[in-house]
Image: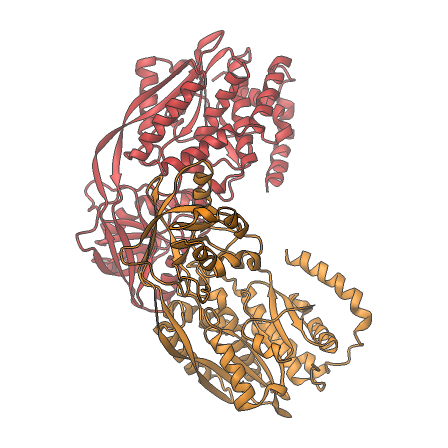
Chain colours: A red, B orange
Amino acid sequence: MKHLLLSALLCVLSLTATQVRAQDVLTPSNTENINDLVEAAVSSDLAWNRLSYMADTFGPRFSGSHNLEDALDWIIQEMEKDGFDKVWAQPVMVPNWVRGEEKATLVFPREQDLPMLGLGGSVATPEGGITADVVVVKSFEELEKVKDEVKGKIVLFNAEFTSYGRTVQYRMNGAIEAAKLGAVASIIRSVGPYSMQTPHTGTMNYEDGVKKIPHAAITVEDAMMIQRMYDRGDAIKIHLEMNARTLPDFESRNIIAEIKGTEYPEEIIVLGGHIDSWDVGQGVMDDGGGSIAAWEAVRLMIKNGIRPKRTVRVVLWANEENGLRGATEYHRWVKEDEKSLDDHVLAMESDAGVFDPIGFGFTGSERGFEILTEIGQTLNSIESGVVTKGGGGADIGPLMNDGVPGMGLVVNGEKYFWYHHTAADTMDKLDKDDFNECVATMAAFAYAVADIDERLPR
Amino acid sequence: MKHLLLSALLCVLSLTATQVRAQDVLTPSNTENINDLVEAAVSSDLAWNRLSYMADTFGPRFSGSHNLEDALDWIIQEMEKDGFDKVWAQPVMVPNWVRGEEKATLVFPREQDLPMLGLGGSVATPEGGITADVVVVKSFEELEKVKDEVKGKIVLFNAEFTSYGRTVQYRMNGAIEAAKLGAVASIIRSVGPYSMQTPHTGTMNYEDGVKKIPHAAITVEDAMMIQRMYDRGDAIKIHLEMNARTLPDFESRNIIAEIKGTEYPEEIIVLGGHIDSWDVGQGVMDDGGGSIAAWEAVRLMIKNGIRPKRTVRVVLWANEENGLRGATEYHRWVKEDEKSLDDHVLAMESDAGVFDPIGFGFTGSERGFEILTEIGQTLNSIESGVVTKGGGGADIGPLMNDGVPGMGLVVNGEKYFWYHHTAADTMDKLDKDDFNECVATMAAFAYAVADIDERLPR
């Protein structure tokens, strides 16, 4: 898979090669430092052990949870051992949605527990739950066709996974569209391409003026089963019970650590991931792995005595999953307090899993793309230096919207949405070599952009 | 995968080709009938729809359950529409183990629910459950090394899946070995090569004179997590609560349907699967699919007016999963009542999933192997006619032990143990074309052996 992708991308690269200037960006010393960082990354256990320790010891790191705050305390403590010039926590008020007890049961045509996860932000059912007939649809278009049959019922959106972007619409807006037609609750088929009775949670929307109804996900298997029953003409009845509550906002933190640039300390390369996760599993792919990879990338610079000309800053953003409050606060602080927006040279994020890395997707200027493409060529030994156009990350989105060049780590993500927002996003899904190559890739690009003479132009 | 296997097997075949007599077994009419059966199998929806209906309507078909009895009633009713010469139910007393409510919780070093399944036949915990420190071992050898630390504790067998046969030892005998050392309960890592937080159940043993302790399976993810915690020196404490009961034996049934042979009605080709499943999921791969494929193979003979010289009999065996009582009773009846053991020409079973079929594994005489190999060559169009030496099935085991030639359907089973004995063994895991090719393969071999002049020699 990776090799196929690489071939395709190298083909694209060769077409654009004539537009790339000769190797004019990296000095021999830059290349040597990159090689040292890559070598250090692929031969170290430290980040892997930290990720594993964090995942096992603190569990899922949901916004508002003590798990997350304990993990953040531990991260700060560890970072302080690493020799960063500065480590600090930036207060962020985050939503505080608490799942509570919940269950779904198929009541008719036969009784069966339906493994489920309420969707983040959903209201509870009335006490005792809701038992109602079910209307099954595969799309909003199908819902429109049966709109007169929905009142007082539960709508099951059995939308087959095509792409995440297309399929997640039912998770985001299913409760709104169902409620507009008088439904009493809304259930989706979990948003994922493969299932072993594994429900997926995730965030969702309500709309002002539309009744808030409970919204939950059942497994792909059960959604398909209910569809088959429905297609055979069976009447379907489901009992749904959810005790979710939204508590007052909770003070959490962005964690920030940096090494000051030796020549242009005011110019900043920021890299990171989001340290919060959903409230199930261990949040390893999404996004403990990306967070710790970014942290490790900078720790390896310190460890190897590599001090770039520009400041390199790690940010572990809070609350990407259900609010983006960490990214919003960091952006506000950069603009209003630190006043460093113009000096944010590049923002990098890893939030697509830490599988076998391919390179980076970059959004920025043509010259920026040329520079990054040259840097990528130093990663041939681990085949992770392909830079493609387009890409970024949710947490660097606010910066990118204000013109900061952004890039997101691209990995072989064929299984990313198998685990995404599930109890199966756990440490065992990672391959240590792949993870270390993600570290190497982030380290190489972050270091190089921070150290080359030419500032990455906007 | 299939093509690799085929290449390897065809290579073996070519080596033995000189020993196979010239095409001397099948008449042109035999070949034509096989082609018709294959064509009918791959173009029909009927068996697929029956399997789907059964899986969805009745749910898991565990021995002792009403689900299973309702499914059997429906099967008999459907078989009576199919034009078999005889359809009957053979009473079989089966064990009646009832899971009841159950749960496992990691209590220390942090609280977390552990998805689990009690193992079939396990005793309950005392009321209120057991909370105990945990000793984690990867093997019986490791257990032996820490035998003095086990008393009063829960043993977790974190045995990595290698082959089913090797790994299942911990499910079968874990409770015995742990109890011998004074453990209060025993937990295994689920027996499967891949997991998405999916626990696997299955049967287990107790030993006379050794205390019966509760025995359950947690997921691969959680077993690995606990191992990591243990390796870091964390004390581990688990709370286990099981309310399993073994009720008095329950009268279930083998379902038998046959078409009488036109020339040698006393000679019998028996084919089938086991109709019982575990009490989770839908028991589609294990073994509703094999059962309905065997049934369909014979229905297609009837439907196409193909009446072989020998009797073809479908048996849907009861209670393979936790007792083998159906197979035992069928064998007893054949020997003592019908007195047809010597006239059982061939026994065929499908119980390895109904994935893309490769052929059959055969246990019998050299001449039998030659004949079957020739028959297999008629299946080149669907690449499912490779006959290999060795093979059979649990339900035909008692017949084979008494000298009846036996064969088991061989499929591309790389995912079989992903789903085996889990809630994820559901209809959606099947591919309709693969399933229909399984039907075609069973039909072709069963028909041919029943109709060729030469009786398959023992």
Q: Quadrant of residue A371?
A: top right
Where is residue A337 drawn, in percent x and y?
31, 14
Residue closest to the eye, B277 or A226: B277
Above or below residue B207? Residue A169 is above
B164 sits left or right of A98 in the view: right
Q: Work out which quarter of the rendered image holds the N terminus of chain A and state it.
A: top right
Give the residue at x 55% y 58%: B164
Where is residue A202 drawn, in percent x and y?
34, 42
Count the numbered circles shown: 0
Residue closest to the eye, A310 or B36: A310
Q: Is residue A369 visible?
A: no
Above or below residue A90? Residue B292 is below
Q: Quadrant of residue A74?
A: top left
Q: Residue furthest top?
A: A263
B416 sits left or right of B365 in the view: left
Above or below residue A233? Residue B454 is below
A240 sits left or right of B376 in the view: left
Q: Quadrant of residue A349?
A: top left
Above or below residue A25? Residue B263 is below
Where is residue B282 drawn, in percent x and y?
42, 65
Give the residue at x 65% y 17%: A22
Q: Residue furthest right?
A: B18
Q: Is residue B225 visible?
A: yes
Where is residue B249 drawn, in percent x and y?
38, 76
